[in-house]
Amino acid sequence: MAERRAASGGEEYEGLNWAGAALLFFVITGLAALADAAITGQLKWIFYASFLVCCVYVALHLRHEDLLAGINIPPIAFVLIAFISLQFSDHGQDSWLTRQVLGMSNFLALNAPVLLFGYAVAALIVLLRWRRRRTRPARESRTRVAAAPRTPERRARARR
């Protein structure tokens, strides 16, 4: 059963599904990339900050059934936003394919620490949420069994 949180208005909120998380991630980081490109002419601090915040937010708010998406969405979004931003960069004399390969290689090489840090944080959060969800039923059942009074039926089962 999915974890439910109370939202405003008394409705129950289960969390983001993978499609909503991906859309949220792409919109927020895309807008940050536009702002960064308009201010600095390249993807830097505004994009980095929004990317890291989105990594944490998506990993914390995904539904438990979609936790694996919390690990897959950040690198896909990072590369896609980088690819889109390359389309608006200055055009040199090289062919389109050469510009794309060199631009993506350069961007990923120079910005790998941000990508890897965001990926590692998201993976750690997802792993902790998955582990907590997996171990919770066992802890609750042990507590219930230990707190239950000893009845003749339980004694008979324990002897078998």
Image: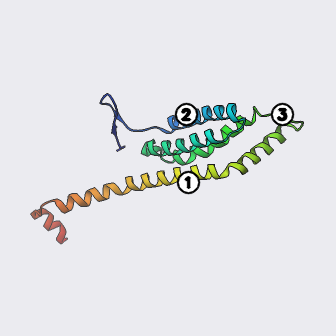
Residue 17 placement, left or right of 87:
left
Task: Determine which of the numbered discs, if any, sits on residue 23 in the image.
Answer: 2
Q: Amino acid at mark 3?
A: His
Residue found farthest to the bottom: 159
The quadrant in which the C terminus is found is bottom left
In the image, residue 70 above or below residue 157: above
Residue 126 in picture, x, y percent from top left: 47, 51
Secondary structure of the residue carrying tag 1 is helix
Secondary structure of the residue carrying tag 3 is loop
1 or 2: tag closer to the N-terminus? 2
Q: Residue at x 58, y 32 (%)?
A: 27
In the image, residue 10 above or below residue 129: above
Label 3 neighbour load within 10 Å: few <14, some 14-19, many 20+: few
Report the residue marked by disc 1.
Answer: 120
3 or 1: tag closer to the N-terminus? 3
Report the residue marked by disc 3.
Answer: 91
Label 1 neighbour load within 10 Å: few <14, some 14-19, many 20+: some
Location of residue 37 (image quadrant): top right
Residue 4 placement, left or right of 107:
left
Label 2 neighbour load within 10 Å: few <14, some 14-19, many 20+: few
> Which of the two residues, 53 or 96, is positioned nearer the viewer here?
53
Q: Residue at x 90, y 36 (%)?
A: 93
Residue 19 in picture, x, y percent from top left: 52, 36
Location of residue 83 (image quadrant): top right
The residues bearing labels 3 and 1 have C-alpha atoms spaced at a distance of 34 Å
Q: Residue at x 17, y 60 (%)?
A: 147
Q: Amino acid at mark 1?
A: Ala
